[in-house]
Structure formats: C-alpha cells, structure tokens
Amino acid sequence: MSRQFFGTDGIRGEVGKYPVTADFMLQLGWAAGRVFASAEGQTHVLIGKDTRVSGYMFESALEAGLVAAGARVTLLGPMPTPAVAMLTRSQKASAGIVISASHNAYTDNGIKFFDAEGRKLSDDLEVEIERMLSEPMGTVPSAQLGKAARMADAPGRYVEFCKNTFPEALSLRGLRLVLDCAHGATYQVAPQVFTELGATLVVIGAEPDGYNINRDVGSTSPAALQARVLSEQADLGIAFDGDGDRVQCVAADGTVVDGDELLYVIANDRVRRGRPPEGVVGTLMSNLGLEQALADKGIELVRAKVGDRYVLEQMAEQGWSLGGEASGHIICADLTTTGDGIVAALQVVAAMAAAGESLLALKSALHKLPQTLINVPVPEGFVLEDCEAAVAESKRVEDVLSGRGRLVLRPSGTEPLIRVMIEGADAGENRRLADGIAEAIRQAH
C-alpha cells in the first residue's frame, strides 16, 4: 500500500486545508493510538510542538484522539523535534509526536512521529497508521480511557542532555556567540545550553508570538544573523530552524557556513581527537568539494536520497555514526537518534574550543564547487518523467557536464516543486544549464 498522507518528513501542509485540519488530527491521534497499542500495558505517547499558533488546536485534537484510543498522553509544550525524540526514548514511551512544519511559515503545520527508540517511523508503520485512518473511529470503554498530563521539567531534561554531548574537559568561556532561534522551538532551551557551558551570548529570534516563526530569521534566512555577528564582533553565529533539527552557522566575517561545511568540521575534529569516522553519509545534493575534502582525510562519503530519513537509513546500513545534509540536518548517531541542531552546533563549537581556531580556519581545507539550485513550482500530481522536454534537456545537460560536474533533478518531498541543481566549476554555465531545464519544466504545464 502506498502512502497517501506521509511524505519524506511526516505530514505537512497549509493549516485548514485537508489533511492539516482539526478533524483529521483527531482521527490521526486515534489511529496512531490504535497502531501503537501494546499488549504489555497502556500505550504512552508524548506530544511536543513548535511555536505556531495552530499548534494549540492540533495538540488538543491529537490528545483527544489518543485518549479515545486508550493511550496515556504527556504534553511537552514547545520543544525542539530532537528533544521529543530524546524524551520518547528516556521515558520508555510507545511513541512521540511533533507538531511542526519545520522551516515553513506559520500558515503551514504538520506532524512527525518517532517510535519508542526515538527514530523516524518505518514505512510499514506509516502505512499501518494510514490503513487505520480508513477505519471508523471509536472510543474505548470509560474504564480504559487514557489521561493527559504536562511534563513541566521537559526543557530542563533536554538542556542537560545537550550539555552532556559537549566534551567535559572543554568550556565555551571566552567565546562570544550570537544565537538565532527563528522564533521557534529552541527559543527557551538553546540560550540556556550555551550560557551554562560558559559562552557570552547575544540572542535573536527568541520572541515567538505564534505568527513570526521563521520570519526573516532562522537557518533559512541568515541575513539578520550575519548583520548581528558583524555588529557584535562575535566569534560565531548559530541559526536554528523553526523546530530545531537544522543548524547553519555564520563565521566571524559574516560568511554563511552550511551543513556540508559543518559536517567536514565535525568529521575533521574527530580525526584530530583520534576517533575518525568510519565514513560520512551525505545526500545527492552534498557538494563535491565535501567528498574531496573528506577523501583527503581518508574518509569515504556515501550519498543517500535527499531527506534526513534516508540519511539515517544509509547510516544504519553502513554502520556509520555521522551524516547530514547541506540544509543543516546533521546527525551524530553516537550522541542522538535524529538530526539535532543544538547537538550539532555544540560539536562545532567544541571543535573551535579544542583547536583554538576560528570556524573559517577549521573549514579552510574544504573548497566547494559552485552550485545553482532552482525550485520550479509545479501542479499537484506533476510527474517529472512524463515531461519529455525536461527529460531531453536533462540528458543534454548531463552530456555537457560529463566528467566535470553533476545534475540533480528531483521532486521536493514537502512542497509541489521540482528542484534543479547543477554543480560545476563555472557558476555562469551552471546557471545557464539550470535555467534551460527549469524553463522546459515550466513550459510543460
């Protein structure tokens, strides 16, 4: 059975448009409660959310559905996605649910699930939940109804977890950092983590009002952080996305440092500490420069499909502990079970503290090839393979780039877009080639 609602990162869409509606979330909570039900005892499900105003509505709907299915619910309030994964595992819960649309605007929202191990759900479990959604919703007898309670100390538990991923012998004293919390789920916990480790902090994007999440701040809008790093003469800027599973950095000179570069810094720091990674998992979009820089250190890069779930799958298959995406999803599997912006940032600042060097110096051996990325809007249901003109143009571009560049052409897993990426030494040529494919796609609808 194919999945109707679940994409590469859960269920996501515009609030009020099916399936991102209160009635669907009620049914989804009930379906998930039935699927996660255990013969060993009462089902226990944790619910966390980011700072979107619609989170209140969906939290209540999911809670009602889960309780109707007989599940006990623990409400975490606004918490980063990776915090929900960690707490699901530490509380021995049956599952964790995150209400978030990540880096999207407040008008969108979505649902992500974690299993009892704090990992993304398997395809089989997602299919089973979708199958249960087609069943008529019922309510267990009153004696079997679940209860709901709030975990008041959830932020503190996650703060301690994050701090414990930072080397005990190191301190951030003497480092001046600017944190950008995207008016999102990290607004409470991230400043506390870095302050308690000794850093001097300037914090922006930490005044959520339900509507301003990701608005001109955060990892997808780094301009505000760049300006503040320069005006504060800070050593580093750190930007999270709305739900805290991504991170981008800004060096002291205002340069944006993306996930590929951060992966290299973390991998190279482990080499210096005598614990070189067995290999690193990237994606089809990972820059060729990352592959070459890692190879110089004797580290292999393997590419997965785009999406952190596919990176995690490849990491498990390879038995490797480090992977991520240029977008800033970085997974340190020896420390946590999913992409975690705060944990990844801590590994970067630990590398700076240990080496006594700037981020620019630490990444200086990585030379990225220019990339051009064009996002082409397409109608719902658009099938790229059926667009003969785009297929033909793509074949021509691959012939042009043969042996000296790459073309990646793929549909987005979260939005109705086709992503056209060209990588090669000549930025101007990259743009011309990408424009040709993009125009062929536009002309097809």
Image: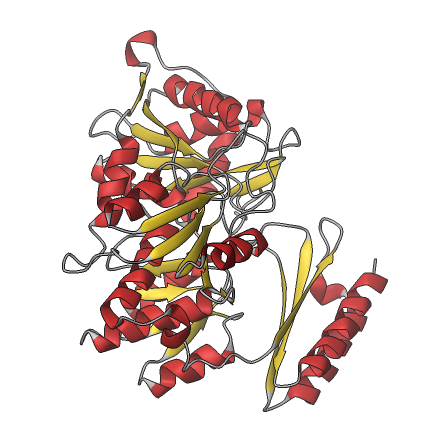
Where residue 274 sits, quadrant-wise, is bottom left
User: Which residue appears farthest toward the bottom when viewing the image?
Assistant: 403
Residue, x 59% and y 32% (percent of image)? 211
Left/right placement of residue 249 relative to residue 343 reads right
Residue 198 shows up from this direction: yes
Task: Say which quadrant the C terminus sits in.
Answer: bottom right
Using the image, determine if residue 293 lies above or below residue 195. Answer: below
Where residue 167 sits, quadrant-wise, is bottom left
Expressed as whole percent of the image width and height from the top left, the position of residue 390 reads: 76, 71
Expressed as whole percent of the image width and height from the top left, the position of residue 295 reads: 37, 85
Left/right placement of residue 20 relative to residue 204 reads right
Tell me how many marks there are. Answer: 0
Q: How is the image coloured?
A: secondary structure
Q: Camera-side residue: 442 or 260?
A: 260
Residue, x 22% and y 56% (percent of image)? 166
Q: Camera-side residue: 396 or 295?
A: 295
Using the image, determine if residue 141 lies above or below residue 220. Answer: above
Residue, x 22% and y 42% (percent of image)? 160
Left/right placement of residue 268 relative to residue 223 reads left
User: Which residue appears farthest toward the left when viewing the image?
Assistant: 169
Residue 89 shows up from this direction: no
Expressed as whole percent of the image width and height from the top left, the position of residue 318 reads: 31, 70
Residue, x 36% and y 74% (percent of image)? 362
Expressed as whole percent of the image width and height from the top left, the position of residue 79 reads: 38, 36
Left/right placement of residue 299 relative to residue 354 reads right
